[in-house]
């Protein structure tokens, strides 16, 4: 194949091709290698789109197909495609309403007395904020109309994108069903916006909530547009996600090994960050009910476009039903409502901005604030109050217990997460009170914003300085440019860096925390007791217990409970019993992870290795050309489920790599997680180390923020007499329990105006 010759092309088309070339760069090699490596028949549909694409790129010609289209015909096709999309959306809604009415789909359950089913426990993960709820419809129509247009004109998306008349008529007509996003910014604004908009002044939408994820590699949809990935390179179906989970991720029930000396805070901080960065919207049924994809006829299944159920192998040790429910992530649309392959919608603000606490959008942020002296709403027991509507659908079992309203709806998934979120609620209000006393003339807004800026700074500092080195290994973290300076400013802002969370980051690499989980919550009342996760999922009871001292018992327990070994094996409480309900029904979290990456059509393990410039595997060995970052045992497991190394899904392939020295993830996840955190640092104008006079800290304030530690926060808010110096590690001689008075606090006088 010749090299691309952009200079010969018309300038405009050249630019477009350049963009596509970057997008497909990884794939080009993958196709070549696939052809050399695999002597089997190759899935025709997948390859067809890609080969067509390469042909046009390499030949450098606008497709002749484009020339044969006349404007009237294009207009008619696009108009009809949009009409068909509207009809399809209506048909889905009617079907959903019918299935809810006949009792097939499960309704929302916010009753405090009626126990929740496992689907209802999962509801917080399917929550849609009001802006996202509107986009569900427009995203569906854009996606459906794209498919219809591609079929009607018998052209691939790449070909269509090269036809100026198609692009312009599409944009003219799609405006009727899809609202383009836009934002105007005031460059003099002192504080970051709640939704992340206007962080990048040249690209105000970068990192904003309710936008699609970034694609680092193009999606691999079966039809090029929307259909989930289901076959491997041989054209044979991929192994069932549950089968992979059983073979690759099953942990010996006797003894999940401890991870060196890391405590469960490494896991818990990770989940808190995840809920700051990603909240992928998942489809819901009529009236917010749960879509059911199992125990239905093949015909009905084919009509439910949200369904992508997981097949359970016949001999499964846990599940007797041959089907596990799986509902697809919502199709988002890009800012301009353009046509293109399906992409998923992130309801979270991408920036590391404590949005799990303050809210990812203005509507939630308003409900969380007290609008009095900068405070957040907090009960006498120093917990979050309930929201106007219970959208977390947590399960309560005592009068007086309720579901708390925080910035993120998933707050109750585990008590440890609830405790950590409550810790930052208390920290916000502690700082706000002190700042308010120091600056009596400051109004509510001043105190709220300045406090929020400090809380975000502290979280960014602990994340980059203390937490990331345990994840990536200290050397890799340093080499990637993630380690903050010990003192003083470190202005790293680069306005060309887009911090928007990538699609792949959320579907696999940042789910690494699932391998660190233990089977129990350590409730440190008196000498402590272990409570099985199954009794804790989505239930705030432990937090409320003992006049809400339970929050501290859970919070302290995390510091003295070792994390599970980062070996890719997953405890049974989430692999077999996720959201276990009173009927004994549950999910497998790992099956959901694997199926989610296929739903998003994220390329497989090998494609990402190539993306990260790591060697790819051509065979199932551990030597050169094989899976060089895996143990022989893990290679054996992968080989027993996958036909070809190119078929390995990214979660199983990545999580089973041997961790980087001193870290908990291997080279592949290290590359993707490291790159994302670098973008979150360089692409965030409000990053705490930046020396920007209007928006940054003074140097003295910054140095004070840099003295804050997780230990100090635990002392302050869980009312402890002492804690080990570094609570991300277990206490021992080198990390001794230390009186709380020894941990430095913020120097508040530096904030006196
Ligand atoms: C404490 C126990 C945990 C439970 C019960 C849990 C449960 C879940 C569930 C049910 C999902 C949605 C699965 C799907 O349908 O795709 C999910 C997604 C996810 N989890 Fe976990 N998780 C836990 C801990 C963690 C930890 C420790 C991390 C990271 C360090 C993490 C990172 C993620 C990420 C990144 C997603 C994708 C989120 C999104 O895109 O919206 N989780 N988790
Ligand atoms: Ca955020």
Image (tube, grey):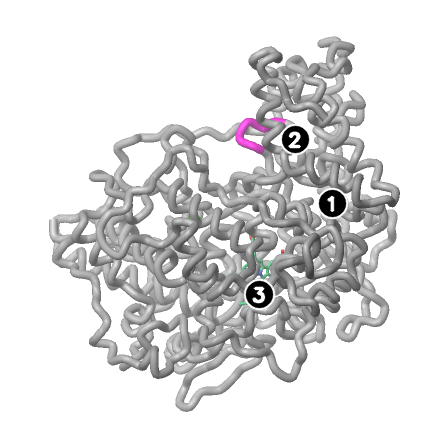
Name the N-terminal-most of marks 1 and 3.
1
Q: In the rendering, which numbered label is found on residue 340?
A: 2
Dominant SS of magenta comes to: loop
Can see residue 2? yes
- Rendered view: 355 above or below 539: above
From the viewer's perspective, tell me whether residue 15 is left or right of residue 451: right
- Residue 157 in percent (x, y) is at 70, 27
Can see residue 149? no
- Rendered view: 219 above or below 460: above
Mark 2 within 8 Å of ligand 1, using the beta carbon:
no
Q: Which residue is mark 1?
A: 228
Residue at image location 39% in from the left, 49% down from the top: 481
Q: The N terminus is located in which quarter? A: top right
Name the N-terminal-most of marks 3 and 2.
2
Q: Residue pushed farthest bottom?
A: 527
Q: CA distance from mark 2 to mark 1?
A: 15 Å
Q: Quadrant of residue 746?
A: bottom left
Q: Nearer the viewer, residue 143 or 743?
A: 743
- Residue 701 in percent (x, y) is at 19, 53
- Rendered view: 122 above or below 258: above
Mark 1 within 8 Å of ligand 1, using the beta carbon:
no
Mark 3 within 8 Å of ligand 1, using the beta carbon:
yes
- Rendered view: 721 above or below 701: below
Q: CA distance from mark 3 to mark 2?
A: 32 Å
Q: Which residue is mark 3?
A: 514
Crowding near pointer 2: few (<14 within 10 Å), some, many (20+)? many
Q: Which residues are magenta?
A: 334-338
């Amino acid at each position: 194949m010749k090299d691309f010759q952009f200079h010969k092309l018309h300038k405009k088309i050249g630019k477009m091709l350049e963009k596509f070339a970057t997008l497909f760069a990884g794939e080009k090699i993958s196709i070549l290698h696939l052809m050399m490596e695999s002597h089997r028949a190759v899935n025709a549909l997948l390859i067809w789109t890609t080969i067509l694409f390469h042909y046009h790129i390499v030949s450098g010609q606008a497709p002749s197909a484009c020339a044969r289209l006349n404007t009237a015909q294009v207009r008619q096709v696009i108009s009809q495609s949009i009409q068909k999309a509207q009809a399809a959306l209506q048909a889905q809604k009617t079907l959903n309403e019918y299935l809810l009415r006949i009792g097939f789909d499960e309704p929302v359950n916010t009753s405090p007395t009626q126990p929740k089913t496992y689907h209802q426990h999962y509801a917080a993960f399917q929550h849609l904020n009001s802006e996202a709820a509107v986009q569900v419809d427009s995203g569906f129509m854009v996606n459906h109309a794209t498919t219809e247009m591609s079929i009607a004109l018998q052209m691939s998306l790449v070909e269509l994108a090269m036809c100026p008349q198609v692009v312009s008529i599409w944009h003219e007509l799609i405006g009727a069903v899809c609202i383009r996003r836009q934002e105007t910014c005031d460059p003099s604004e002192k504080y970051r916006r709640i939704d992340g908009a206007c962080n990048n002044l040249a690209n105000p939408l970068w990192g904003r909530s309710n936008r699609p994820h970034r694609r680092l590699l193009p999606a691999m949809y079966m039809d090029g547009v929307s259909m989930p990935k289901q076959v491997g390179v041989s054209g044979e179906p991929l192994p069932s996600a549950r089968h992979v989970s059983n073979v690759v991720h099953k942990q010996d029930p006797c003894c999940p090994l401890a991870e060196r000396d890391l405590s469960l805070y490494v896991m818990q901080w990770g989940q808190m960050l995840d809920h700051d960065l990603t909240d992928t919207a998942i489809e819901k049924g009529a009236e917010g009910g749960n879509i059911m994809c199992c125990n239905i006829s093949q015909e009905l299944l084919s009509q439910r476009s949200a369904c992508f159920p997981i097949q359970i192998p016949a001999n499964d040790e846990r599940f007797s039903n041959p089907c596990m429910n799986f509902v697809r992530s919502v199709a988002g649309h890009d800012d301009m409502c353009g046509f293109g392959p399906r992409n998923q919608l992130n309801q979270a603000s991408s920036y590391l901005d404590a949005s799990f606490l303050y809210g990812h959008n203005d509507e939630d942020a308003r409900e969380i604030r007290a609008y009095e002296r900068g405070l957040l709403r907090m009960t006498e027991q120093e917990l979050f109050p309930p929201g106007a509507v219970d959208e977390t659908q947590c399960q309560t079992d005592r009068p007086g217990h309720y579901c708390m309203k925080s910035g993120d709806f998933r707050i109750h998934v585990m008590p440890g997460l609830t405790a950590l979120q409550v810790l930052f609620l208390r920290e916000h209000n502690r700082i706000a009170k002190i700042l308010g006393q120091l600056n009596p003339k400051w109004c509510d807004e001043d105190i709220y914003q300045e406090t929020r800026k400090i809380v975000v700074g502290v979280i960014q500092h602990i994340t980059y300085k203390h937490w990331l080195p345990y994840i990536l290994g200290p050397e890799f973290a340093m080499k990637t440019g993630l380690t903050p300076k010990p003192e003083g400013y470190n202005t790293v802002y680069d306005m060309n860096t887009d911090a928007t969370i990538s699609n792949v980051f959320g579907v696999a690499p940042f789910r690494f925390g699932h391998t660190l989980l233990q089977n129990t919550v350590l409730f440190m009342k008196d000498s402590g007791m272990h409570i099985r996760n199954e009794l804790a999922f989505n239930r705030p009871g432990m937090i409320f217990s003992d006049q809400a001292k339970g929050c501290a018992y859970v919070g302290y327990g995390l510091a003295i409970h070792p994390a599970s070994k980062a070996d890719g094996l997953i405890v049974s409480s989430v692999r077999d019993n996720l959201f276990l309900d009173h009927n004994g029904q549950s999910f497998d979290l790992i099956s959901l992870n694997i199926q989610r990456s296929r739903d998003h059509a994220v390329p497989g393990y090998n494609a990402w290795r190539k993306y990260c410039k790591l060697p790819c595997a051509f065979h199932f060995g551990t030597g050169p050309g094989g899976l060089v970052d895996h143990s022989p045992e893990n290679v054996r497991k992968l080989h027993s489920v996958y036909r070809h190394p190119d078929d390995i899904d990214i979660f199983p392939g990545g999580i089973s790599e041997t961790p980087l020295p001193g870290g908990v993830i291997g080279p592949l996840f290290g590359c993707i997680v490291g790159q994302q955190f670098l973008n979150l640092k360089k692409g965030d104008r409000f990053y705490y180390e930046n020396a920007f006079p209007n928006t940054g800290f003074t140097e003295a304030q910054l140095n004070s923020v840099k003295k804050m530690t997780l230990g100090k926060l635990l002392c302050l808010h869980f009312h402890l007499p002492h804690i080990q110096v570094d609570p991300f590690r277990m206490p021992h001689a080198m990390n001794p329990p230390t009186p709380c008075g020894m941990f430095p606090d913020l120097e508040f006088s530096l904030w006196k105006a």
